[in-house]
Every structure is written in C-alpha cells, then in structure tokens.
Image (tube, grey):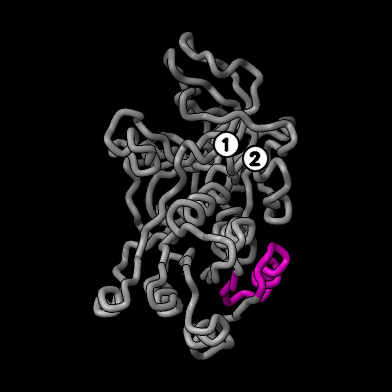
Amino acid sequence: MKAAVFYGQNLPLKVEEVPKPEINAEEILVKVAACGLCHTDLHYIDHGVPTFKKPPLILGHEISGVVEEAGANVSNFKVGDRVLLPAVMGCGVCENCRAGRENICNSMVMPGNDVDGGFAEYVKAPAKDCFKMPDEIPLQEGCVIADAVTTPYHAVKNRGKVQPGDQVVVFGCGGIGLNLVQVANAAGGSVIAIDINQKKLDKALELGAVAVINAGEVPDVAKAVRKMTNGGADIAFECIGNPKTQETAFKCAKNGGRLVIVGYTEHPMALNVARVQYREMEVIGSLGCRSVDYPRAIEMVRSGKLALMPLISKRFSLEQINEGLDYLRSGDGFRSIVVLDESLK
C-alpha cells in the first residue's frame, strides 16, 4: 500500500510503498477515506517533539474510512461499515480507564505517534475503540471529528464545564479553537474569540462568537476582555500552545475563574501562584476526548448543531501531503484533509 512516512525532524514525508497492516482477532482493517492535517503532526516534523514509536512512522490521527476486514472475535463491525477512529485509544483496564478517563490512559495509544496512523491507504485499530459514522456525515470531511471536534467537546463539557450564561474567551481560531467556539456556544456560553487573523475571527463570528478581538491590533488583550466581561471571563480556553498566550488567557479569567489549557507546548509558562491561591483560580489541562463522549460529539455533527463543512479549507491527495503541511504552516486555513480514496464519500 502507499503511505506518507515520517523519517525524522525537518524532513519531508516520503510517499512510498509499505506493507499492508495485518490484523489480529480483536482488530479491524480500515480502508482510509481521509485523514486530517493537524498541528500535532508539525510538532513532530518541525519542532522535534519525539514520537513514542521511533521513525520510520506513518503520521496522522484524524482517520475515517470503511471496514475492509474484521478480526475473528469482532462483533460490533462488519466489512463495509463506515467508521471513525479515535485520536487516543485506552487500554480499558488501568485505573484511569476504569474511572471513565480513557483519554489519559496509563498505556494510551495514539495513531501516528505510538503506532502507524492514517496517512496511508490502510490502517488497523482495535475494534473496541472505533465508532460507526452515520450516513448523514460525509466520510471524508468527517475525519476531523476524531480530534478537531471531540477535543473541544471534552474541553468545554468536562474540563471547562461551561454552563448557560457563562462568559467564555477562546484564544486561537484554528481548527480546534473554532470548534471550541461552536461547542461553547452550543453549551450556552457567550464566547469572545481572539486571534491575529481577521479571516479566522470572521469565521468565529459565523460560528457563534458574540465578539472578537484581533490581538494584533489591541495593545492589552486581557484588559480589553476584562472590560468587555465586567471583570473577567468565567472560563478562558487557550488553544494555541504558546506560553505567552497562556499567561494572557489566565489574566482574562475573573477572580475564581478557570483557565483550560488545550494547546500543547513543551515550554513552561509563568504563573502568578499568589493569584491562584488568593483568588481561588483554577488552571486545568485538557487532552483529547473520553471514549464515552465520541457518540455525543458525532451526534452533534449529524444533527447540525455543530457545522463541519465550513471548516474544511482544502483537500490534498496523498502525493500532495507535503504541500498540505506547508499550507498548515502558513496558518491560512481552518482545517485541511488528505483524501486517500476519492470513491469513499
């Protein structure tokens, strides 16, 4: 089969022939329809963040497709079923999994990191972790649900705990941030979106933000947010992964408020611990999504409560994947996908 293989930092992915995966009795083999391009992939390629499986490795963790083969013990899928693979898979038996927190499993497996991912014609996965994709959701574009939709869902529902009437500020209007705007709006929050790209801010308004701030044009973003919210937001979400914006987001939260860190960075942020203690602030991390919430996020897309198609900026073939990564680096789009099989809709 063809796959785009990662060989190391600062190297382009190499499209080449590799062996087709062989499944065990508990797994399914999926013919990949499409796989989303995510900044996490750039962390490995551009920033030297190590993958758990040493290169060569097939990247890609937003995967949709059709079941090509089902293992002997698989009962929940059959050949031809439309499926979505989660971005994080839990073992099901560790303490965190048993507590319903599979997204922070002690032995978590992430496609395109721990094991080969979806920038390939075929990928295998444990059947217990996969989800059926409703016919109403386009299979190709729907691949981004695996991360760009479910990660914001978890951040809003379980970590931020947004309630109707909450004032919410979202830093970063890429694929994750724009979907976080949508989910927070659906949860009843009044959302202020912040970015330096006016096109992305305009899209945030289309998706439910009540106001936007162009950080490139405002000298003190935190001061502006506090003025707009009469003292600070109830919950601030940082979706960029930049220590400076994390610090600014913390300043945007009101006394007793909550900062939810969704964006990844390996660099430390400065934190005013005195304010955390004296004002009873909360600083919370958010990673991926619990397995139990995937069907809920999928249903929100199926029913039209969350828009999907307006967020797909461009489609690339497997042979164009390095062009797609360059487009991701440019910061121009919202979310792009690599289409592996045009016939799978």
Q: Which residues are magenta?
A: 191-210
Q: Residues within 10 Å of mark 1 (few under 14, many from 20)?
A: some
Left or right, 55 with reference to 231: left
Residue 191, how many percent across, how many down? Answer: 60, 69
Query: Which residue is drawn at the image coordinates 47% and 37% (left, top)?
Result: 291
Q: Is residue 136 magenta?
A: no
Along the line of sight, which residue is nearer the eye, 196 or 95? 95
Amino acid bearing label 1: Pro
Q: Is residue 207 magenta?
A: yes
Left or right, 105 with reference to 166: left
Disc 1 to disc 2, C-alpha distance:
6 Å
Residue 207, how many percent across, how many down? Answer: 69, 62
- Return the residue at label 2: 299
Query: Which residue is drawn at the image coordinates 27% and 36% (left, top)?
Result: 95
- Return the residue at label 1: 295
Most extreme residue toward the bottom is: 219
Image quarter (top left, top right, bottom left or bottom right) of the C terminus: top right
Residue 59 numbered mark, or none: none
Left or right, 120 with reference to 90: right
Along the line of sight, which residue is nearer the eye, 54 or 282? 282
Task: State if disc 2 and disc 1 touch (CB < 8 Å).
Answer: yes
> Tag 2's secondary structure?
helix
* Residue 305, placed above or below residue 302: below
Amino acid bearing label 2: Glu
Q: Quadrant of residue 216?
A: bottom right
Residue 181 seen in this snapshot: no
